[in-house]
Amino acid sequence: VLKKHPTKFVGCCLANPAENGTGVKQLEDLILKDGYRAVRFNPYLWPSGQQMTNEVGKAMFSRAGELGVPVGFMCMKGLNLHISEITELCTEFPSTAVLLDHLAFCKPPLNDEEKLAFSELLKLSRFPQVYVKFSALFRVSRMSSPYLDLVPLLAEVVSNFGANRVMWGSDFPYVVPESGYKGAKEAACLIASQASLSSS
């Protein structure tokens, strides 16, 4: 698909954190030979007891920056479990752009732990290389479409990061049985309008 429609699609590969370090070469090949333009770090693929800040993780993160591709973090079990790793990588390798997938899985906070996680997300705005994906709204909202409980979260994210560091994503194809692509886009536009954000 990427080779057939290079002006329409951009590929994001998945980092291989195998302890033998083969993931670094695989990452290079996927970017330099196959044209992938981003890499996702899934912390739950790291060997048991290891973190994304291990030697292999740092090598892949650093190399991604050298190759000019962003690293997306998929913190499905919560940002609070990985905030120290993300902070360490952003501090040590400031030239690597970072994408926090799906609002870093921060839901509208209901308790102090969730408030702290959202606060930690906002604090990551101090790193100019960090971007937030306002994506997969059905995964982070506590409501059904159009997910209006996300209005205050989007307002705070944009206030802290700036509109140029926030991007929308549908989470296609998983969005299809939820609200569909069109419904997801309309929900994002409605949330943005209620958060008093311009369309630009």
Image (cartoon, helix red, strand yellow):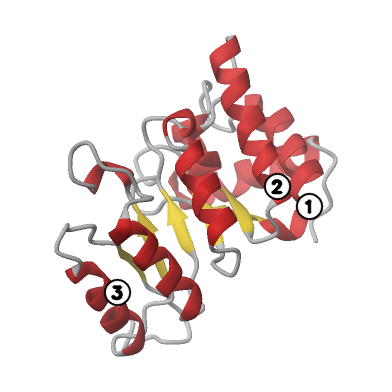
Give 97 or 21, whichever is nearer the viewer.
Answer: 21
C-beta proximity under 8 Å, tags 1 and 2: yes
Per the rendering, the mark at residue 125 is 2
In the picture of the structure, the residue carrying the numbered disc 3 is 27
Q: Secondary structure at mark 1?
A: loop
Q: CA distance from mark 1 to mark 3?
A: 30 Å
Amino acid, disc 1: Gly
Residue 161 % position (x, y): 74, 49
Depth check, mark 1 against mark 3: the one in front is 3
Depth check, mark 1 against mark 2: the one in front is 2
Residue at left offset 37%, top offset 36%: 76
**Total number of numbered discs in the rendering:** 3
Residue at left offset 46%, top offset 81%: 67
Residue 30 % position (x, y): 29, 79
Per the rendering, the mark at residue 193 is none
Instruction: Check the picture and name the quadrant holding the C terminus.
Output: bottom right
Residue at left offset 34%, top offset 40%: 177
Residue at left offset 23%, top offset 61%: 16
Amino acid, disc 2: Ser
Residue 157 appearing in the image: yes
Q: Is residue 141 above or below residue 89?
A: above
Residue 26 % position (x, y): 23, 75
In terms of sequence position, does the residue under pointer 1 or pointer 2 come before the other? 2
Q: Quadrant of residue 188?
A: top right
Q: CA distance from mark 1 to mark 2?
A: 9 Å
In the picture of the structure, the residue carrying the numbered disc 1 is 162
